[in-house]
Image (spheres, rainbow, N blue to C red):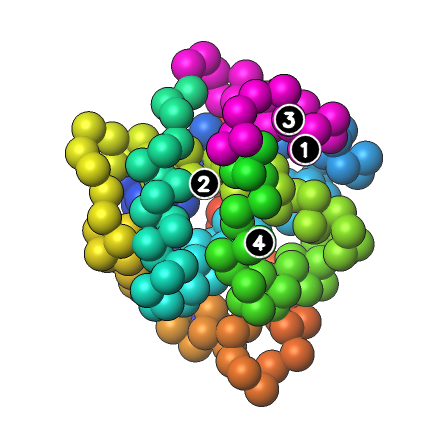
Amino acid sequence: HYHNRGISMASLLGELTSQLNSESVAQIAKQLGVDPDVAKKAVGAALPAVISGLSLAAEDPQKRERLAKVVNEHEAHEGSFLDQLAEIFNRVTHGSSGSEQQANLSEILPDILGDHGKRVERSVSHTSGLSMEMVQRLMKYLGPLLLGVIAKQMSGKHVDADAVNQQLTHEQQQIEQSWGKAIVGRMFDQDHDGDFDLSDIAAVVMKQMG
């Protein structure tokens, strides 16, 4: 039923999955207090769902303006992906030791996703078996990483709201081409309760992780 079970490595999803290796997933699992396989499935479900949710949220002019502002203000991280994770874990777990803008990065994703975020969280919880509280913590880890990849891919130029919207629309189209418009769209259907099983998508994303 899927058109293409691969992930374009030029995409945001491809960039993230190429960097999320077993060591970084183990770090996330440790922070959540769960088995690495459970964390990996949760991440595999969360990444495409979050990108799809952001694409829908960016249809709101105010939200895409805010996203563009965050991307433009995002400071390029030096060091490894694990270093970035450690920094995010420290901010989420112990509070910010950096700027106010850095502190807000872990909160920006659920704020921009809004109602779409609740549907993502319920679906990731349903798919992985993680509690809603754990999924919400996972989102705080993944949000800054995703925004960092967007900033990296658009680095060297000022990003306006339309550019962010176009990037996310392109990402959504790639996800729909890979897994079908219906399977992703149903999760955000207004009549759906949000308990949508993302196991098929998660399995493919998990295989792409380093």
Quadrant in the rendering for residue 118: bottom right
Which residue is label 3 attached to? 96
Q: Which of marks 3 and 2 is in front?
A: 3
Q: How far apart are marks 2 and 4 (CA)?
A: 13 Å
Residue 160, position as x, y percentages in the image: 23, 48
Q: Does the magenta stretch include residue 93?
A: yes
Quadrant in the rendering for residue 26: top right
**Which comes sooner in the sequence, label 2 or label 4?**
4
Which residue is label 2 attached to? 146
Dominant SS type (magenta): helix
Compared across the picture, whether 92 is left or right of 107 comes to: right
Residue 110 — which label?
Answer: 4
- Disc 3 marks a residue whose amino acid type is Ser
Q: Distance between the residues labelled 4 and 1?
A: 14 Å
Say whether marks 2 and 4 touch (CB < 8 Å): no
- Disc 2 marks a residue whose amino acid type is Leu
Vertical placement of residue 126 versus 105, above or below: below
Q: Nearer the viewer, mark 2 or mark 1?
A: 1
Which residue is label 1 attached to? 92
